[in-house]
Amino acid sequence: MADDGGDAPPCDSDYISNLPENVLVTILSLLKLDEAARSTVLSTRWRHLFPYTLLDFRAYAPGRDVVAAVNTILAAHPAARVRSFRTGLLYFPPEDDPSVEAWLRDLAGRGVKELSLSFRERWQKIPASLFACTSLKRLHASSCTFPDATQAPVPLAALTEIDLFGVNISEESLGALLSRCTALEHLRMRSMGWCHRIHVRSESLKTLCGCGDFDELLIEHAPNLEQVYGNYMYMRSTHLKVAHAPKLEFLGYLGMSFDTIEIGQSVFTEDDFDIKTLMPSLKTLAIELSYTSEGYINWFMQLLKLFPCLETLYIRSDTWSKVRAAAPGSWDVLRSVPCIDNHLERVVFEVYRGHEWQREMAKFLHGRARFLKAMEFHCQGDKGCSELLGEEWVREQQELLCLDSRASLDARFLFFKGALVNNHHDVSHHEWYKRKYYHYLYNV
C-alpha cells in the first residue's frame, strides 16, 4: 500500500525566494506599480530587490491613483537608478498639478535616458523641467502640449530620438529642437497640432517621418538627412523645398496635389516643370499617382528626371475611393529617363487591381528598365480586402503584362495576396517583417 507521507518532514522552503535575483526582478516588474511596492514587506531580500525594478520604471496602475503611487515610490527610494520612465494616459484634474514637474526634476537627477509621457488630453502640458533631463536620449510624447523649447536654458544635447503623437507644438519650438538638439538623428511626428510649417536646420538629423499633416516642409540645411517620409503628405497642397540635403536617399509620398516641389534650383508644379538641378543621392521614391488627373503620365516622367540614380519606386494610387476611369494618356513614349534606363531595380505597385493603366505602366517600366530585379504587384480587387483574387486571375495578368518583353531577363515578377500594408516603411527594417513579407505570394 502506498505511503501516505504522514511521517514526512514538513516542507517550509520558499521556492520563489530561492529563485535568482534577475528572475525575481522580472516577476516584480510585471506586477502593477503599487502591488510591486507592497511586495517589499514579504522579506528583506524582496525589499532589497524592489529598487532594481525602477531601472525601467513603468508608471501604470489601472484603477488606482498612479500619481500618488509614483510620488511615494520616488520619495521612498531616492538612490534608485531610473534608466527609462513610462506613463500611460495620465490625467490631472487641475492644470497646475506639480507632480509631473517634480518627477522630471527627480528623474533628471537620476540620469534618465528614455522618457515616454502619455496623457489623456492635449491641453495637459509637459512641464519645462523636461529640459533639465540633460542625459535624455529618447523621448516619446503623446496627447499633450509641448513646452516652449525656445526658452530652454540648455539644449537636450544627448537626445537622439523624438517621437511625437497627437502633440501640440509651435513651429518655433519645433525649429528650436531641430537646431539645438545637436545629437538628434530621428524625428517622428503624427497627428500634430499648431505646427503647419516645418523648417529643418540640423547638422545631425537622419530621418524625418510621420503622417505628413503639414502645409510646408522646408529643408534648409540637413547635411546628414537620409530619409523624409510622410505617409499622407500627398493628401495636402504641400509646399516641399529641399535646399540642402546631399545624403537624402528616401523621399515620399509625393503627389500631383503638391502645391510646389523644389529640389535645389528645380521647381516642379502640376503644370510647370523647370528642371535645373538634380538629386543623384536619392535611391528610393514613393509616389501617389493620380491616374484620374489629366497629364499624370507626363507628371510622372518629369518627376523621375529629378532623380537620375533612383533604384526603387513605390507606386500608390487612389486606393480609398471608388474605382474610376483613368485620364487619357499613352505610355508609348520615346523619351529617355536615365533612372529607368540605367538604375531602376525594384518597382512596387502597392495596390494592383489589374486596370489597363496599371498594366500599361508596368509594361513601360519593365520594357525599359535594363537592370530591373523585381516588380511587385500587391493584388486587391475592386471590392477591397474582402475580394479574394485567385491564381487564375494572376495567370491572366501575367499574360496581359507581356512579361516576355522585359528588358531585364533576370527580373522577377511577384504577385502578393492583398495590398501592401500601410505602415510598410515604418516596419520594413524589422527582421520579423522581413521573414513574413514573402509568405503571401501567389504560387504561380
Image (spheres, helix red, strand yellow):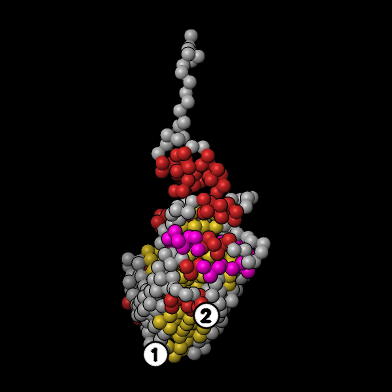
Q: Does the stretch in magenta take in 317?
A: no
Q: Residues within 10 Å of mark 1 (few under 14, many from 20)?
A: few
As displayed, is residue 143 above or below residue 84?
below
Chain part drawn in magenta? 105-129
For disc 1, the marked residue is 276
Is residue 100 shown left or right of residue 301? right
Q: Residue furthest right?
A: 93
For disc 2, the marked residue is 172
**Which residue is painted at 53% across and 70% down in the image?**
128
Q: Element at badge 2?
A: helix
As displayed, is residue 225 above or below residue 352?
below
Q: Residues within 10 Å of mark 2 (few under 14, many from 20)?
A: some
Please tell me which residue lies in front, 93 or 255: 93
Toward which corner of the image does residue 208 lie, by quadrant? bottom left
Q: Earlier in the sequence, mark 2 or mark 1?
A: 2
| Residue 8, horizontal then vertical, whole percent | 46, 16
| Residue 303, horizontal then vertical, whole percent | 44, 82
As displayed, is residue 30 above or below residue 118?
above
| Residue 12, horizontal then vertical, whole percent | 47, 26
**Which residue is painted at 32% across and 66% down in the image?**
410
**Distance between the Cα atoms at labels 2 and 1?**
32 Å
Toward which corner of the image does residue 319 lie, by quadrant? bottom right
Answer whether labels 2 and 1 touch (C-beta < 8 Å): no
**Disc 2 vs disc 1: which is toward the camera?**
2
Question: What amino acid is labelled 1 in the image?
Answer: Lys
**Which residue is painted at 39% across and 79% down in the image?**
222
Question: What amino acid is labelled 2 in the image?
Answer: Glu
Please tell me which residue lies in front, 155 or 265: 155
